Amino acid sequence: MHVPGSGRRLVGIRTGGSMLAVAMLGAAISGCTTQASAPTGPPPVEVASFAGLVRLPDGRRIFAECSGEGTPTVVMVPGSRSWHDVWDSVEDRTTGKLMVSDASAFGRVAKVTRVCTYDRPGTSPKDASAKSTLVTQPTSAQQGADDLQAWLTAAKIPGPYVLVSHSWGGMITTMYAGSHPDQVAGLVYVDSATPNLQGALTTEQWATFTGALPKLVDGSGAEVPDYPASMDAVRAAAKNLPQVPTVVITADQQFDFGAGGAQTWPAWGQAQAEFAKEHNARHITETGSAHMIPLTQPQLVADAVIGVVQQARN
């Protein structure tokens, strides 16, 4: 089974020197992945650019990175089993290799405003020098939204935010935005899962999609999204979404998302179309991409995000 947004090993080479200057955020940031000149004396309360581990109140750590300056801060939320590189990397269509680049969606947005992304538990690459703390799987959208709030607060990153999500990340951002509407300045859904998905599938297709998920729990701590436990809560949260600039970007190339073969793919887009209509969102359907739009069409994503940022500023 393919979990949308999952299973991509991202190996990259950062290009350019503007992406991240690693720094410490007081006691909240530890275990940074890149060396930088250590500041003398106490670090500032808020550092615009950093890459490292954010310590949560419960003792766990979340890997996060931020770059750029300006408001509102854009927060990019990856899909299931994807990590921060899905936003700050681009795909070489000739070789299929991924490179961390200033031409990524993350890099382009960082030229306009502050942008952050992170690794949820069970998504950091195994060989990463700084990993988010593992938790028991599966995890719900509510848990994802709680962790999002926790690390943003611990890292002293003030809202309101423009939330950008991919795949399962859309369930988390909808949960967060419906629970914290005053902390959201805009929303961008990049081929994201929506609470409309269950209704767009037949009963059999939904059973196929959700029935395979428990089999992914293998004791390794790798993320497994709990769609069944999340649907009702996310539907309720969606009814409380703030009236902010919203964009939905949908894949126009077929892929198998695990509901019974590629022939079920139209339901994935149908759910997004319904969600976009319900929330008066701009709906972009000509993308020239399958599911991994952040990697294959980073400029398209960045342009949509920057457009929302500019609307939020007005």
Image: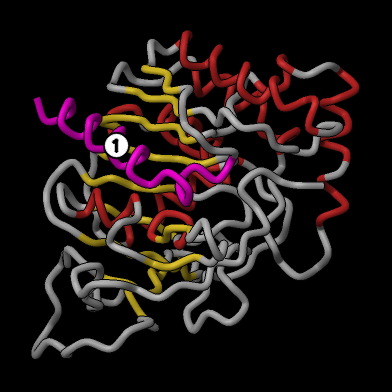
Q: Residues within 10 Å of mark 1 (few under 14, many from 20)?
A: many
- Which amino acid is tagged 1? Val
Residue 308 inside the magenta-drawn segment: yes
Q: Is residue 34 left or right of residue 212?
A: left
Question: Considering only vertical position in the picture, is 250 above or below 36?
Answer: above
Residue at the spot of label 1: 305
Residue 285 inside the magenta-drawn segment: no
Q: Residue at x 76, y 70 (%)?
A: 220
Q: Nearer the viewer, residue 52 or 55?
A: 52
Q: Is residue 224 left or right of residue 14?
A: right
Where does residue 48 sit, x and y in percent of width and height?
17, 63
Q: Residue at x 12, y 87 (%)?
A: 39
Identify the image quadrant of residue 102.
Answer: bottom left
Question: Considering only vertical position in the picture, is 15 above or below 147?
Answer: below
Secondary structure that dominates the magenta span: helix
Q: How many marks?
A: 1
Identify the image quadrant of residue 192.
Answer: top right
Identify the image quadrant of residue 67.
Answer: bottom left
Q: Residue at x 23, y 72 (%)?
A: 16
Where does residue 311 sit, x and y in percent of width and height?
17, 25
> Which image quadrant: the C terminus?
top left
Magenta-drawn segment: 291-314
Q: Is residue 267 left or right of residue 112?
A: right
Q: Residue at x 85, y 25 (%)?
A: 205
Colour convention:
secondary structure
Q: Nearer the viewer, residue 254 or 40?
A: 254
Helix, strand or loop under label 1: helix
Q: Nearer the viewer, residue 177 or 244?
A: 244
Where does residue 267 sit, x and y in percent of width and height?
70, 20
